[in-house]
Image: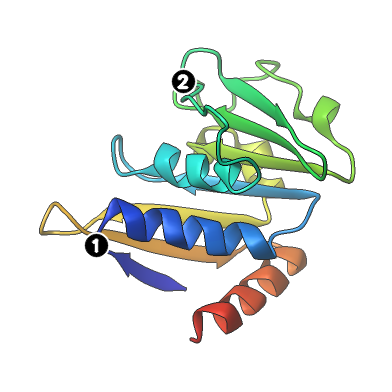
């Protein structure tokens, strides 16, 4: 699925709509160059569970946890992780039926990437303003969620 977003408000709106159809457990990976809006998209998803939640980029701490009534969210930023680096964080310790992992730079962890359900690639368009969002399902569950999302978007 390909979507063009023109403003930050468009990004927030898309992330909010997306958060309404995702269900746990789920791993969503994000890719894209520095500064394209990965953290902004994730912040909007997290704030859909609590609009007052302060969401910061976990670049230096690698992961931030958010515990809500219906979901446990781990927001990971794997930018500083070297390809195939081991034992930097145990994602298995987060696993239960209510977990949602949102991982920026997921391609830096080939194991987590292989287990991901959905991949969201954010690309800066040639006009250096708009964003192209490419969303793909990597698992049966991810594909089912994307079919539901397409219905919501009317595609």
Secondary structure category for the residue under label 2: loop
Quick check: 84 above or below 112? above
Residue drawn at (82%, 40%) of the image: 69
Q: Which residue is mark 1?
A: 6
- Residue 90 spot, x, y in % from top left: 76, 22
Residue contact at pointers 2 and 1, CB within 8 angstroms: no
Quick check: 95 above or below 128? above
- Residue 93 spot, x, y in % from top left: 84, 25
Is 76 placed left or right of 80 in the picture?
Answer: right
- Residue 1 spot, x, y in % from top left: 47, 73
Sequence-earlier tag: 2 or 1: 1
Residue 140, quarter of picture: bottom right
Give the label on residue 102, or none. Answer: none
Q: Residue furthest front?
A: 52
Closer to us: 25 or 79: 25
Q: Nearer the viewer, mark 2 or mark 1?
A: 1
Residue drawn at (35%, 61%) of the image: 10
Q: Which residue is mark 2?
A: 59
Secondary structure category for the residue under label 1: loop
Q: CA distance from mark 2 to mark 1?
A: 26 Å
């Amino acid at each position: 699925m390909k979507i063009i977003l023109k403003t930050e408000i468009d990004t927030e709106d898309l992330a909010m709509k997306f958060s309404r159809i995702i269900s746990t457990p789920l791993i969503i990976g994000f890719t894209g160059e520095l500064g394209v809006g990965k953290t902004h998209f994730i912040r909007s998803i997290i704030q859909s569970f609590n609009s007052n939640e302060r969401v910061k980029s976990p670049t230096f701490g690698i992961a931030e946890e958010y515990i809500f009534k219906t979901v446990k969210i781990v927001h990971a930023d794997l930018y500083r992780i070297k390809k195939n680096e081991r034992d930097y964080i145990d994602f298995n310790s987060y696993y239960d039926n209510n977990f949602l992992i949102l991982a920026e730079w997921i391609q830096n962890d080939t194991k987590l990437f292989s287990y991901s359900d959905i991949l969201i690639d954010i690309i800066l368009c040639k006009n250096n303003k708009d964003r192209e969002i490419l969303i793909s399902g990597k698992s049966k569950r991810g594909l089912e969620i994307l079919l539901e999302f397409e219905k919501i978007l009317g595609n």
